[in-house]
Amino acid sequence: AQTVTQSQPEMSVQEAETVTLSCTYDTSENNYYLFWYKQPPSRQMILVIRQEAYKQQNATENRFSVNFQKAAKSFSLKISDSQLGDTAMYFCAFMKQGAQKLVFGQGTRLTINP
Amino acid sequence: DTAVSQTPKYLVTQMGNDKSIKCEQNLGHDTMYWYKQDSKKFLKIMFSYNNKELIINETVPNRFSPKSPDKAHLNLHINSLELGDSAVYFCASSGSDRTREQFFGPGTRLTVL
């Protein structure tokens, strides 16, 4: 079974700083997808960024980028120029190709301080 | 123009009661899901339906029964509620694209007293 581990329960940075959230996963699959979801205090789950395992190029969405290391089974999220609105729980998630479910990590609570 | 909606958003009830949570999506997706988020914020899949057919049942107690009357709806009925059922329940849906990106509803916070 796949597992996803987020080793940082909480992080806190100043506004405008860059922060990196860690995620590792365990799988024997070769084809899969990785996701970062954001859950602000409103509790809505919002997709931040997605990476397909067969793509070597790291995904980027505006201030959000990932460092995908397939051999190391690592998928970290970098937030540049952090903003107060980035304050949220961030979840790393794994889905093997053809599957119908997301496997989530434990989450990292990120606080952006003014 | 809400994509995935759930009702109610909050549900407070007594132990032993039976309750239902409704979910609807207007995205034209063929797959719908129920996830449970516990008090420690951990999210775990409960059920998945594809075209009204049950695909995934992740060792959820029989007291939980999902029902999909059509592709756009997936309801969750819970019998004999227990204290441990208190959680936030999320409905989600995905289409048939390769990545099967999942879109989540706003969640239903269930509190069992």
Image: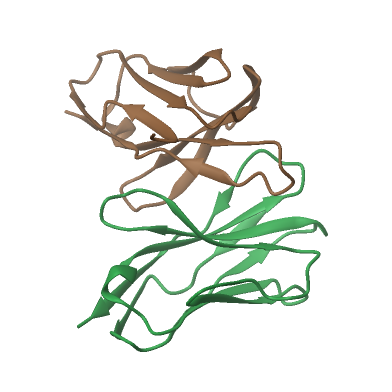
Q: Is residue A104 above or below residue A78?
A: above
User: Could you tell me residue A13's position as x and y percent?
Assistant: 31, 84
Front position in the image: A72 or B91: B91
Q: For this view, does B30 lie left or right of residue B25?
A: right
The image's colouring method is by chain
**Residue drawn where x is 34% and y is 70% of the image:** A86
Q: Is residue A68 above or below residue A107?
A: below
Q: Is residue B5 above or below residue A27?
A: above
Q: Which chain is green?
A: A
Looking at the image, the residue that sits furthest to the front is B1
Q: For this view, does B96 lie left or right of residue A92?
A: right
Q: For this view, does B47 lie left or right of residue A25?
A: left
Looking at the image, the residue that sits furthest to the top is B69
Q: For this view, does A56 lie left or right of residue A78?
A: right
Q: Is residue B37 above or below residue A76?
A: above
**Residue drawn where x is 76% and y is 42% of the image:** A98
Res. B104 image quadrant: top left
User: Could you tell me residue B57's position as x and y percent?
Assistant: 60, 27
**Residue drawn where x is 54% and y is 32% of the image:** B27
Q: Which chain is brown?
A: B
Q: Quadrant of the C terminus of chain B?
A: top left
Q: Quadrant of the N terminus of chain B?
A: top left
User: Could you tell me residue A27's position as x and y percent?
Assistant: 73, 59
User: Could you tell me residue A62's position as x and y percent?
Assistant: 51, 74
Res. B10 image quadrant: top left
